[in-house]
Image: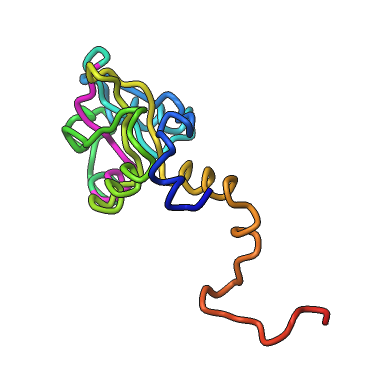
Amino acid sequence: MSIEAALKETRIGELRPPEPACVARGATLREALSSMRERRAGCVLACEGDQLIGILTERDILRRVAGEDVSLDSPVTGFMSGGPRTLTADDLLGDVIRLMAEGGYRHIPIVDKAGRIEAIVSIQQIIQFLAELYPAEVLNLPPEPHQYMDSREGG
C-alpha cells in the first residue's frame, strides 16, 4: 500500500488511539498536571460529563504556567484552550494529519457522532503507525534526507 493510499483509506480508529486523560470543568491545575503525569500524557481534556469543553497541552503549560506566578490550585479552565477541534474514529488518517498541520496541533480529541469523548490521537501515534506500516523505508532512511551514497556500503 502506498503512503497516499494509507492516508486516504486508513480510518483513525485503526490506530487504536487510547482513552484520554480527562478532568472535570472544576478541576484545578494541580489535578490536571497530576492526571497528565499519571497517564504519561501530553495533554488532558477538560470535560463536563462526557462532553469536551477544552484541552490543556504541554504547550499551554509552557506558555501560560511555567515561569509565571500561578497557583496550582487555580481552575484548569483558565489555562486550557477551549473548544478544541475534533474528529471521529471514522475520519481518515489524512484528515487528522491535515488538521494537525493546519492548526499546529500535536493532539486531536476523537469524539463519537453525539460529541462524546472516545479517544485522543497524537502525532507520536501517527508516526509510530506509519513507521510500522513502512518499516523498510523508515529503517533505510539516510541520516540526512538529501544524502546519497556514491557506492554500496561494503562493496
**For this view, does 8 lie left or right of residue 133?**
left
Region in magenta: 51-63
Of the pair 93 and 124, the residue shown nearer to us: 93
Q: Looking at the picture, how far across and down is residue 36, in whole percent?
A: 41, 32
Q: Quadrant of residue 137?
A: bottom right
Q: Looking at the picture, how far across and down is residue 90, in whole percent?
A: 35, 28
Picture residue at 36% right of the left edge, 21% below the top? 118
Q: Please determine whether, in this image, residue 65 is positioned above or below residue 32.
A: below
**For this view, does 117 lie left or right of residue 3?**
left
Q: Outermost residue toward the bottom?
A: 150
**For this view, does 64 lie left or right of residue 43?**
left
Q: Looking at the picture, how far across and down is residue 40, in whole percent?
A: 48, 34
Q: In the rendered picture of this protein, how many numbered marks are placed on residues? A: 0
Q: Quadrant of residue 144?
A: bottom right
Picture residue at 65% right of the left edge, 57% below the top? 136
Colour mapping used in the image: rainbow
Q: Is residue 36 magenta?
A: no
Picture residue at 47% right of the left edge, 52% below the top? 3
Q: Is residue 60 magenta?
A: yes
Q: Looking at the picture, how far across and down is residue 31, in whole percent?
A: 34, 25
Q: Please determine whether, in this image, residue 109 is positioned above or below residue 142.
A: above
Picture residue at 36% right of the left edge, 36% below the top? 43
Q: In the rendered view of the protein, which quadrant contains the C terminus?
A: bottom right
Q: Outermost residue toward the top?
A: 49
